[in-house]
Image (cartoon, grey):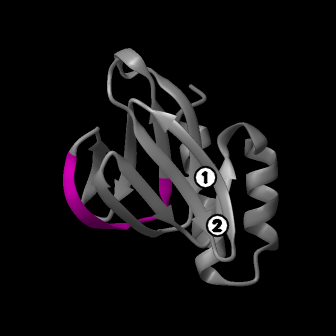
């Protein structure tokens, strides 16, 4: 049996998602980083971006938009703490544009603009 990572995304006061997976790609501030089982312990500062859950064969099984945060990685565990997380399949371009336009704070506008840019780039 191949090893897996216990992955968790949490927001303040709430666990957003917990699952076991082969690997996870995180949007680190210095570039994307792939987390695999038995990785050395580390803390990673995250930027606004997309967390990708990878299955066997490195195929993307799920994606989440996150609003920055930190990742605590040790052995076969990866815990992401973020201010905001959105399931990839629960938002479309129109909704992201509307959320961006309605946002009151610049950091929220930047977060939704990142989603808009990602959806535009990956819809072609």
Q: Front-most of 11 and 114?
A: 11
The residue located at (76%, 83%) in the rendering is: 104
In the drawing, does residue 40 fall left or right of residue 36? left
Disc 1 element: helix
The circle on residue 115 is 1
* Residues rendered magenta in the picture: 39-49
Q: Quadrant of the C terminus?
A: top right
Q: Residues within 10 Å of mark 2 (few under 14, many from 20)?
A: some
Q: Of the two numbered discs 1 and 2 on the same chain, state the one appearing first in sequence.
A: 2
**Dominant secondary structure of the residues highlighted in magenta in the image:** strand
* Residue located farthest toward the left when viewing the structure as drawn: 40
Please say whether residue 44 is one of the residues in the magenta stretch. yes
| Residue 93 point in image, percent of width and height | 73, 44
| Residue 62 point in image, percent of width and height | 57, 33
Disc 2 element: loop
| Residue 95 point in image, percent of width and height | 81, 51
The residue located at (78%, 63%) in the rendering is: 99
* Residue located farthest toward the front when viewing the structure as drawn: 1
| Residue 61 point in image, percent of width and height | 54, 26
Query: Rounded to the nearest whole Å, what is the CA distance between mark 1 and mark 2?
Result: 12 Å
Front tag of 1 and 2: 2
The reply to whether residue 96 is visible in this rendering is: yes
Q: Is residue 121 above or below residue 71?
A: above
Q: Quadrant of the N terminus?
A: top left
The residue located at (40%, 53%) in the rendering is: 78
The residue located at (65%, 72%) in the rendering is: 109
Q: Residues within 10 Å of mark 1 (few under 14, many from 20)?
A: many
In the drawing, does residue 46 fall left or right of residue 50? left
Question: To which quarter of the image does residue 119 belong?
Answer: top right
Please say whether residue 90 is one of the residues in the magenta stretch. no
Residue on which the image places disc 2: 84
The reply to whether residue 114 is visible in this rendering is: no
């Amino acid at each position: 049996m191949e090893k897996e990572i216990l992955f968790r995304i949490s927001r303040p006061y709430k666990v957003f998602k917990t699952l076991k997976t082969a690997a996870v790609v995180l949007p680190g501030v210095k570039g994307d980083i792939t987390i695999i089982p038995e990785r050395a312990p580390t803390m990673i500062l995250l930027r606004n971006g997309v967390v990708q859950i990878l299955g066997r064969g490195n195929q993307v099984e799920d994606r989440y938009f996150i609003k920055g945060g930190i990742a605590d990685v040790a052995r076969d565990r990866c815990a992401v703490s973020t201010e905001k997380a959105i399931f990839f399949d629960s938002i479309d371009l129109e909704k992201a544009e509307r959320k961006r336009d309605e946002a009151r704070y610049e950091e929220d506008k930047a977060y939704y603009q990142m989603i808009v840019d990602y959806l535009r780039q990956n819809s072609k």
